[in-house]
Image: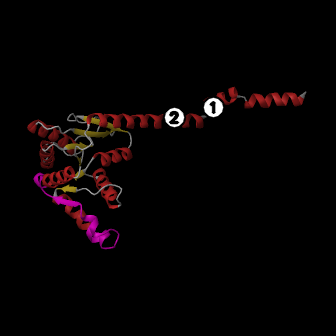
Amino acid sequence: MSSKKSAEEAHKIASPKTVAKKSKTDPRVQRRKHLDDRLRILHERALVLERELQLVEDPRFYRTCIFGSARIKSDSPIYAQVAELARLLAADGIDILTGGGPGLMEAANKGAQLGKLEKNTKSRSYGLSIRLDFEPTPNKHLDIKRHHMKFSSRLDDFMRLSHSIIITPGGVGTLLELYFSWQLIQVKHMTKRPIVLLDKVFWAGLLDWMRAEPLERGLISSHDFEFVHLVDTPEEAFALISAHQKDFARKL
């Protein structure tokens, strides 16, 4: 009798209903379900972006990514320079891609809209935003915007969508974007493309250090500097990007 009772209890413990009931209360199962739901949502968002790009973008159209500080105000000389550079590029039919936030990102997207209107080109102003306390909403000068939850996926999209890179003055985030793109070209995970540093006063010291320390100690090679260009004016930056765009178009 006791043996039969034990078997019934064992069956009860192992029954699907019992397992299902336990899974509803087990915090580990709930955490895993939450993670799976988040991953599914992120994947669905990525697919939506892919479909949007396929629908609205000619894959041959050329895009340049402009990185820079969110903290710089609109009355700063560098803000005007970045807006002018983006205006020149958009007037030449080149898409502008930024982080979609304030500061120099806003300057680039604003300049892109001005250049597009000026020459009636089909260039677009992109913004890949991310939630930060000092970047609560994307700027208002975007044709296409995409919000990211993580810096890692955002950086991947910057690299995937751009054909050239312009680095303007900025802080830790801008340095991350510079070195991330530089390394991907260095290790051939991304095709060679120009990285243009705008503002010689701001960037020259960093390049001097890169040559005096990492290069001198054999930690990098001299050819790692071949695609990095230091310029001081929007016109110089535009000349480099425009030349690269024309070379890109010839190879299609």
- Which amino acid does the dot numbered 2 rest on? His
Can residue 220 be found in the magenta stretch? yes
Report the magenta residues as a range. Answer: 210-236
Q: Where is residue 239 in the image (x, y as percent from the top left)?
A: 13, 54
Query: 2 or 241, which is in the foreground?
Result: 241
Asked if one can make out residue 53 in the rendered structure from this viewpoint, the answer is yes
Q: How many residues crowd around disc 1 within 10 Å: few (fewer than 14), some, or many (20 or more)?
A: few
Q: Find numbered disc 2 in the image and state the secondary structure of the residue it sits on.
A: helix
For disc 2, the marked residue is: 34
Visible residue check, residue 169: no
Among the two numbered marks 2 and 1 on one chain, the one whose residue lies closer to the N terminus:
1
With 100 as the anchor, is 5 left or right in this view? right
Quadrant where the N terminus is found in the figure: top right
On screen, residue 19 versus residue 161, left or right, reads right
Q: Residue drawn at (74%, 30%), measured in percent from left and top?
A: 13
Q: Nearer the viewer, residue 8 or 80?
A: 8
Q: Residue at horizontal 17%, vertical 42%?
A: 107
- Residue at disc 1, secondary structure: helix
Residue placed under numbered mark 1 in the picture: 23
Q: Does the magenta stretch include residue 214?
A: yes
- Disc 2 to disc 1, C-alpha distance: 13 Å
| Position in image of residue 190 (x %, y %) | 33, 55
> Badge 2: how crowded within 10 Å, few (<14), some, or many (20+)?
few
Q: Position of residue 23 (x, y in %)?
A: 63, 31
Q: How many marks?
A: 2
The residue shown at (35%, 37%) is 50
Q: Position of residue 90 (x, y in %)?
A: 15, 42
